[in-house]
Amino acid sequence: MVLPAHLIQRNHIPSSVTVGTIPRYVFRVYNPKSAGETSTTRVASPAPECSREDIFVTLRRHPQEAFRRLLDHLNGYDDSHEEFCNFMSWTSSLLFALLYGIYQAEFTNNRYDDTKILILDTQYIKPGSFIKDIDILRLFDDSGAPRGFGSIHNFLKLRREYYFGEYLSQSEVDVLGHCAEASFWDLMNHGLEELYPWLFDASLEGKWAKREKDAREKYHKDDTLVTLDDAEKVIKIAENSFGGSWTTPMAAMILGLERRSPNDPNIASAFRNRGTLLGSLDVNISSTDMNGNNLPELESAGNVIAAIRVGDVSHQPVEELDELAHLDLDLASLALSDASHQDDTQDEKYVES
């Protein structure tokens, strides 16, 4: 489990807590009414600087207050706590980010051009800046959270069915030079709604969490082979909305909104035809988030990157093959994600006790 090492001494952490890793890419969806500050310069919590006490310090000094602050943020039902909230939420799932942003734009008096999605490359961010929601919930549960307190115990059980790849940051994160953003209007205008109309299904008002759960059902079906034309359209969406080195990871994750094969020839052809490597050959669609918390959309995006790599090897000049060798896919972990999920389920039995 990754904790804010720059904010808390290691001797405050229970020895039972394991150290995990953070996905390469995480997203934030925001609009002008969002709490705190989100920009391509920094992401800062709404809490005044004078009251930005680290949650783990609060846990040690005032455990009941720490429990309340955490659950207030994760539940999100009441905005009254936000004035002093020191958390900001992120997600590793583009599927979740898109569904949540569309919900915000459609049903909460916001607009598509005011609703934005920010992607951050965490490899350049100070270690310990992010923590998985499930990890912090487990830590708090192990620290003696009362069963009726909201409750963390029940929240953990709920996360097994509704898992969104959520991560938390505290206080402020400097993101300058390591992120990109686009409005939902940009994404729609460049063709996202045309290719994935089910994302915009207005009949599911107020049910965006169920929408994601239902959307993941398609990943249990056979791989969907993409047409060359559609693959090229996805690349254009990513290129026109985010651009530069963000094109490859964003295109891979957009294509990953449906189950893809690592052997799809049209994916490789589309990227080759567009010349879309753009220095992004080291893209790593992390599988760490699927270890016990299955996010099939990440596995599918990993398959897209694999298809690009396989297709490019036979067509790239020799000097470019060395660059391809740096494409870190962790494919073995991807292939074993289902087995890992079952193993971790055994470890999580205490949640149901």
Image (tube, rainbow, N blue to C red):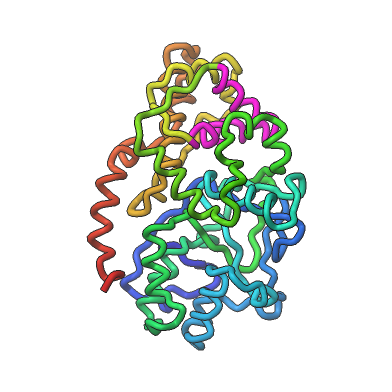
Q: Position of residue 127 (x, y in %)?
A: 51, 58
Q: Is residue 348 above or below residue 340?
A: below
Q: Which of 14 and 146 lies nearest the eye of the viewer?
A: 146
Q: Position of residue 191 (x, y in %)?
A: 66, 29
Residue 163 can be seen, yes or no: yes
Whether residue 238 is in magenta: the answer is yes
Q: Nearer the viewer, residue 137 or 212?
A: 212
Against 134, residue 188 (above or below) is above
Q: Quadrant of the N terminus?
A: bottom left
The spot of residue 344 in percent (x, y) is: 27, 57
Q: Identify the image quadrant of the C terminus.
A: bottom left
Residue 292 x, y percent position in the rendering: 33, 54
Q: Main secondary structure of the magenta part?
A: helix
Residue stretch in magenta: 229-257
Q: Is residue 124 visible?
A: no
Residue under the point 61% across and 41% down: 200
**Residue at figure coordinates x 46%, y 43% from the top left:** 215
Q: Is residue 314 above or below residue 141?
A: above
Q: Is residue 331 left or right of residue 286?
A: left
Q: Quadrant of residue 260?
A: top left
Numbered circles on residues, count: 0
Kindly indicate the quadrant of the structure image that contains residue 84.
bottom right
Q: Is residue 119 above or below residue 274?
A: below
Q: Residue at x 56, y 50 (%)?
A: 204
Q: Quadrant of residue 232?
A: top right
Q: Which residue is more in the foreground, 271 or 314?
A: 271
Query: In the image, is 171 to the left or to the right of 63?
Result: right
Outermost front residue: 203
> Which residue is at a point 69% across and 50% down the rendered structure image?
105
Magenta span has 231? yes
